[in-house]
Image: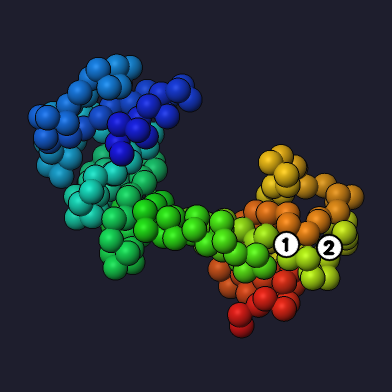
Amino acid sequence: MGRSIARELIENGHQILLIDKNPSAIRPERVPNAEWLLADSCELSSLAEAQLGKCDVVIAATGDDKANLVTSLLAKTEFGVPRTVGRVNHPNNEWLFTEAWGVDVNVSTPRIMSALVEEAVTVGDLVRLFTFRRGNANLVEITLPGNSPYVGKPIGLIPFPDNCALVTILRDGMVYVPTPEQPIESGDELLFVVPSEKEDELERLLSPSSHRG
């Protein structure tokens, strides 16, 4: 996973250092434009050798939740890294991946997979795709059912909950930037950034017959 993330970020113009304590995992030919360090990211001396204080972001993406937590905590508290991202492998550990453990953003592999399944098969139900820890908000998706009271209505006339932002509309394989004049249609996939406490209100507004509350 670390190598895959590194390749994506390098393609987007970022400089990457990969750290792994397993010699067999050090394969520079797999990500030739990255720097590599054979070290244990849970050791303070290893992170000092990696000059972590010069990094903008640390991504702890191992398959071990304990290692990801320790790496994030050291990066934040000992080296003042501005932003840390921690991978959650076991859903029971998700509650630990908070700012108290030095994690700015947690990425739960099980939650993302289940959310993608829900997003693919549900219509009218709000599906949480991602949590923005610092903003106390979530990226959510809802596929507009045909019986929604707002089918065909312009976005500007829909009384969305406070602090709820419609980010984009996915329709027929196209991405549309929302405008006040644009109507929403049955089958549209609507992506919102919304506070947790407003999710039920948003679902009830757009899909009252499907609302589970």
Please state which amino acid type lies under the numbered disc 1.
Answer: Leu
Tell me the quadrant of the picture where the N terminus can be found: top left
Q: Residue at x 29, y 44 (%)?
A: 61
Q: Position of residue 120 (x, y in %)?
A: 56, 56
Q: Position of residue 48 (x, y in %)?
A: 17, 33
Q: Residues within 10 Å of mark 2 (few under 14, many from 20)?
A: some
Q: Is residue 78 left or right of residue 98?
A: left
> Of 55 and 113, which appears nearest the observer?
113
Q: Position of residue 17 (x, y in %)?
A: 28, 27
Q: Which residue is mark 1?
A: 144
Q: Is residue 93 left or right of residue 126?
A: left
- Pick whichever of labels 2 and 1 is earlier in the sequence: 1
Q: Which residue is mark 2?
A: 151
Q: Residue at x 39, y 43 (%)?
A: 83
Q: Report whether residue 53 is seen.
A: no
Q: Are marks 2 and 1 in contact (CB under 8 Å)?
A: yes
Q: Is residue 82 left or right of residue 126?
A: left
Please state which amino acid type lies under the numbered disc 2.
Answer: Val
> Of 95 and 32, which appears nearest the observer?
32
